[in-house]
Amino acid sequence: MAEAQSPVGSVDRALLILQEIGKHSRGVTLDELATRLGLPKSSLHRLLGALKHRGFAAQPEPSGPYFLGTELLATAFRFYETMDLRTLVRPLLLRVSEEFAETVHMATLDGGEVVYVDKVEAVRSITMTSVIGGRNAAHCTGVGKALLAWTYPTDESVKAWAERFGPLSGRTRNTLTSPAKLATHLDQVRQRGYALDLEENEPGVRCVAVPVFMGRTAPVAAVSVTALKDRMSPARMEEIGHGLRKAVAEHV
């Protein structure tokens, strides 16, 4: 599908320039930018001049490569330090709950546990232990596994996490309590793109969860869809998994 036309061409080009510069930690030259973006050097030079004036781009040496400017970095860090995660992600939770007609959670990782930051109850809600501000073990919840899989992206780091915050308790007969098996399972989560809770935290309850990165390398939160086992067939969970990934990508 073709990308939507930007309403303001010059602004769009400036943003594309920043995106491209951000891909090159050692800087990128005017010639390279012109080639990569397909823009005339004269137009590029003017836009780069405006970005440099505001501190969003930097060129330490005349005729040298361009880097992201300190003002851009400072603006981003100020935003992340003060952002209200719940306010930012709430519209996504409402959209997902309406789309799948099920209860939706958002949680963050705190050591060996997840903390539920927000929750949208479905009309056909179910009784669960999760409440806003409540906690559950990370290794046996969908949101927890979505957070762990990308926060600890190697078998070694998962095992180190388990050693630090373990032992891994068995909430149900389906709970993974072996660090080695958990590490293998989280590798499958990364390959699939979403995590599953197959009655590992509460009998009769299943969920599908995906990470939310907000521009960071490790997830800042995870979002899940939770329902009774009878409404969570393998095909339904796969549908929700793909739908959740799409919704998160479009929202953040």
Image: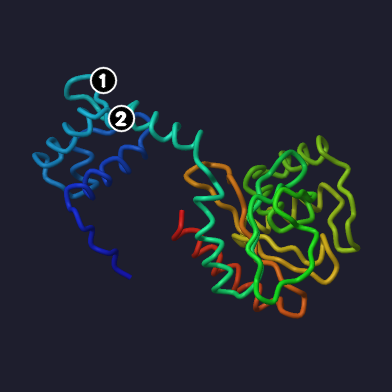
SS for dot 1:
loop
Figure colour scheme? rainbow
Q: Residue at x 90, y 54 (%)?
A: 170
Judge from the rendering whether residue 194 lies leftward or rightward of residue 8; answer left or right. right
Task: Estimate the spatial distance between the alpha carbons at disc 2 and disc 1, rounded to whole Å.
Answer: 8 Å
Residue 207 location (% of width, % of height): 71, 66
Label 1 sits on residue: 60
Q: Residue at x 31, y 28 (%)?
A: 69
- Kindly indicate the quadrant of the structure image that contains residue 198: bottom right
Q: Residue at x 87, y 52 (%)?
A: 177
Q: Which label number is shown at residue 22?
A: none
Residue 51 location (% of width, % of height): 22, 33
Position of residue 119 relative to residue 34, above or below, is below
Judge from the rendering whether residue 114 lies leftward or rightward of residue 48; answer left or right. right
Residue in the foreground of this view, choosing between 124 and 250? 124
Position of residue 98 relative to residue 184, above or below, is below
Residue in the foreground of this view, choosing between 179 and 227? 227
Label 1: few (<14), some or many (≥20) within 10 Å?
few
Residue 217 location (% of width, % of height): 53, 42
- Kindly indicate the quadrant of the structure image that contains residue 238: bottom right
Three-letter residue code for mark 2:
Phe
Q: Which label number is shown at residue 67?
A: 2
Residue in the foreground of this view, choosing between 96 and 172? 96
**Quadrant of the drawing holding the N terminus:** bottom left
- Kindly indicate the quadrant of the structure image that contains residue 193: bottom right
Do the residues under discs 2 and 1 have CB atoms within 8 angstroms?
yes
Three-letter residue code for mark 1:
Pro
